[in-house]
Image: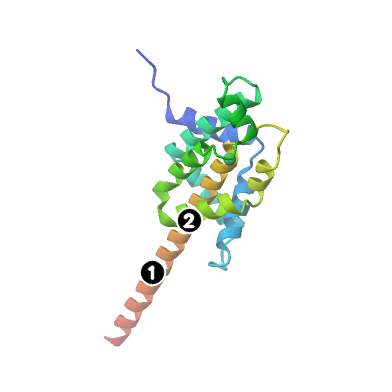
Amino acid sequence: MVKTVHSKEVTKAAFNRLQERGVNLSDIAEIVYEMQYAYHPALTLADCIDSVNKVLLKREIQHAILVGVELDVLAEERKLSEPLQSIVETDEGLFGIDETIALGASLGYGSIAVTTFGHLDKNKIGIIRDLDTKRGKGVHTFLDDIVASVAANAASRLAHSFRDQEEIAEEDKKQFEDEGIK
Ligand SMILES: [Ca+2]
């Protein structure tokens, strides 16, 4: 019988993979902060780190990390077969599977995640830019997009949770006023 993989093992592997490839949670959180602070002045970097952590606990995100990083590493070790080896190694312009996997991992987080991912894909900022421009120093064809997806999902989570908080505050206020009238 094939042994099933415990989710804790997958979680640990995904977190380790990011770290091994030089991506810290605070690097991703800084992008989230950059994307959201204009809308939420009370936002802190700690809120962003917390949101990134929660996104990284999702199984579909962990799977995207494992698949993407594995392909980057295999390309770095020149272990892929041609022509895929050259395509991944050079981050060939028309190769879009890296973006497709990353975008797929954002779909569960709603339209804010998808549009934020599109924005980050176009205007690479922070660690995404670092990974994208590290040509000749390792292959990060998949990782830059996956980091953009994690950041976009964490930004979307925050936008939704701020809205929820505002609505709760509004309802509390209304209830207070209603009770005051009585
Ligand atoms: Ca890429």
For the residue pair 172 and 129, the one nearer the viewer reads as 129
Please tell me in which quadrant of the rendered image residue 40 appears.
bottom right
Q: Return the residue found at the far top.
A: 1
Where residue 62 appears, x then y in whole percent? 48, 36
The relative height of residue 53 versus residue 13 in the rendered view (above or below) is below
| Residue 167 tag number | 1
Q: Secondary structure at mark 1?
A: helix
Residue at horizontal 38 percent and vertical 68 percent from the top: 168
Does residue 12 show up? no
Say which quadrant the C terminus sits in.
bottom left
For the residue pair 8 and 180, the one nearer the viewer reads as 8
Residue at horizontal 35 percent and vertical 72 percent from the top: 171
Residue at horizontal 65 percent and vertical 26 percent from the top: 76
| Foreground: disc 1 or disc 2 | 2
Where residue 61 appears, x then y in whole percent? 47, 39
Where residue 8 appears, x then y in whole percent? 46, 31
Disc 2: CA contacts within 10 A as few (<14), some (14-19) or many (>=20): some
Q: Amino acid at mark 1?
A: Glu
Numbered marks: total: 2
Does residue 120 show up? yes
Where residue 84 appears, x then y in whole percent? 56, 26
- Alpha-carbon distance for marks 1 and 2? 23 Å
Say which quadrant the N terminus sits in.
top left
Quadrant of the image where one finds ligand 1:
top right
For the residue pair 180 and 24, the one nearer the viewer reads as 24
State the residue position of label 2: 115
Disc 1: CA contacts within 10 A as few (<14), some (14-19) or many (>=20): few
For the residue pair 17 and 119, the one nearer the viewer reads as 119
Residue at horizontal 29 percent and vertical 87 percent from the top: 181
The relative height of residue 22 versus residue 36 in the rendered view (above or below) is above
Q: Do the residues under discs 1 and 2 have CB atoms within 8 angstroms?
A: no
Mark 1, ligand 1, within 8 Å: the answer is no
